[in-house]
Image (cartoon, grey):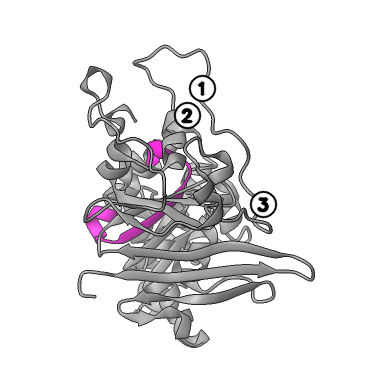
């Protein structure tokens, strides 16, 4: 456990209503080392956000049920921690950047006071030093300290996201979970926010889980990649494993849908069919109704992990053909993105 900050084993989470059960996460395994950035990639409804909320123990109490698994953080299972212990862990050891900065900030409280609150809850600082610490965090994310007393509506979308990042990093957490942190931003501001996150990650040596569906963002910032489909990780590996040697047919479909500047295309390739209904998942491999390589065996049995290397595994009976390391004109997928 010395080289692992986070280890998730066999995590299964359902959402239940009076007449339906949503199978959100199914037997998920995940490892994260200190200082490592993991990209959690998948379509909407794949279970990415549920995984993040499970780590923080902020799933809705009424509907959500953790049916099995362990979430080991620094060697201790978060699922067995008391509510009081989790309140101390959130913000201090594990922080989260939510999807939409517009709704993450309290509109009637100044941005400085919101940073101050996080520091006050988790850092051992005298009240007289809170303002300076909050102003320093604003400057760390590129906002002048003179804007401490401004309200969220006085900031642009990109600046609001910087404030959210300042709040998340104000207590120097060991793990930062970023849930689609650039979704609501235009392309130029996205690049600025990603550059900021890379810079801060290097400065603070914070491990990060980046939840996204944008493979370009993953190529820019991540060390390892986990591909999620229908609540489970179907392929996992280093950035190079996934981008230049992916073997799961779903991962292949994701990469085939990316346009290339090297090849003239009139239409983009698509993955046939639709994502399955999480209340009525297919038998066997959940991807088999959409898979071009599927056999009868795929519809009957759920695949286990096939280890392709020390760093790379896939859940598939019929792996896609191995990819060439170099693409046309000697450019790898990572370089293209």
Query: Circle 1 sits on which residue?
Result: 268
The image quarter containing residue 115 is bottom left
Residue 124 can be seen in this image: no
Looking at marks 1 and 3 on the same chain, the residue that comes earlier in the sequence is marked by 1
Q: Position of residue 253 (x, y in %)?
A: 46, 35
Q: Looking at the image, is mark 2 or mark 3 nearer the viewer?
A: 3
Quadrant of the image occupied by residue 245: top left
Would you call the spot at circle 2 few (<14 residues within 10 Å), some (14-19), or many (20 or more)?
few
Residue 223, how many percent across, how many down?
Answer: 27, 50
Q: Label 1: state its secondary structure.
A: loop
From the image, tell me which residue sits under label 2: 257
> Which span of residues is magenta-colored?
201-217
Q: CA distance from mark 2 to mark 3?
A: 22 Å
Compared across the picture, whether 190 is left or right of 6 comes to right
Q: Are marks 2 and 1 in contact (CB under 8 Å)?
A: yes
Q: Position of residue 3 (x, y in %)?
A: 21, 69
Task: Confirm whether the magenta stretch covers residue 213.
Answer: yes
User: Would residue 66 be visible to someone looking at this image?
Assistant: yes
- The answer to whether residue 246 is left or right of residue 296 is left
- Image quadrant holding the N terminus, namely bottom left
- Residue at 23%, 27% in the rendered image: 326
Mark 2 or mark 3: name the one nearer the start of the chain.
2
Where's residue 34, x and y in %? Answer: 25, 65
- Image quadrant of residue 32? bottom left
**Residues under numbered marks 2 and 3 in contact, where contact means CB atoms less than 8 Å apart:** no
Q: Which mark is residue 106?
A: none
């Amino acid at each position: 456990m010395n080289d692992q900050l986070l280890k998730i084993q066999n995590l299964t989470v359902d959402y239940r209503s009076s007449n339906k059960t949503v199978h959100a996460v199914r037997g998920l395994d995940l490892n994260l080392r200190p200082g490592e950035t993991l990209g959690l990639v998948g379509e909407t409804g794949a279970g990415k956000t549920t995984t993040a909320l499970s780590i923080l123990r902020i799933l809705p109490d009424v509907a959500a049920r953790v049916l099995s698994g362990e979430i080991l953080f620094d060697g201790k299972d978060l699922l067995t921690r008391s509510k009081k212990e989790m309140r101390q862990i959130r913000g201090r050891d594990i922080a989260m950047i939510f999807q939409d900065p517009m709704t993450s900030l309290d509109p009637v409280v100044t941005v400085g006071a919101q940073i101050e609150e996080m520091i006050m809850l988790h850092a051992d600082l005298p009240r007289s030093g809170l303002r300076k610490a909050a102003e320093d965090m604003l400057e760390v994310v590129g906002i002048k300290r003179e804007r401490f007393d401004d309200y969220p509506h006085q900031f642009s979308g990109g600046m609001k996201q910087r404030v959210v990042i300042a709040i998340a990093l104000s207590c120097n957490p060991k793990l930062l979970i970023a849930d689609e942190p650039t979704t609501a931003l235009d392309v130029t501001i996205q690049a600025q926010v990603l550059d900021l996150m890379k810079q801060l990650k290097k400065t603070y040596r914070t491990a990060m889980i980046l939840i996204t569906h944008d493979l370009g963002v993953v190529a820019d910032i991540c060390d390892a990649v986990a591909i999620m489909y229908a609540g489970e990780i179907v392929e996992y590996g280093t950035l190079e494993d996934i981008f230049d040697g992916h073997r799961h047919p779903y991962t292949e479909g994701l990469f085939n849908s990316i346009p290339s500047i090297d090849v003239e295309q009139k239409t983009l390739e698509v993955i046939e069919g639709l994502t399955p209904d999480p209340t009525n998942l297919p038998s066997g491999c959940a991807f088999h109704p959409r898979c071009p390589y599927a056999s009868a065996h795929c519809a009957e049995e759920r695949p286990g992990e096939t280890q392709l290397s020390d760093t790379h595994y896939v859940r598939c009976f019929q792996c896609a053909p191995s990819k060439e390391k170099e693409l046309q004109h000697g450019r790898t997928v990572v370089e293209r993105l």
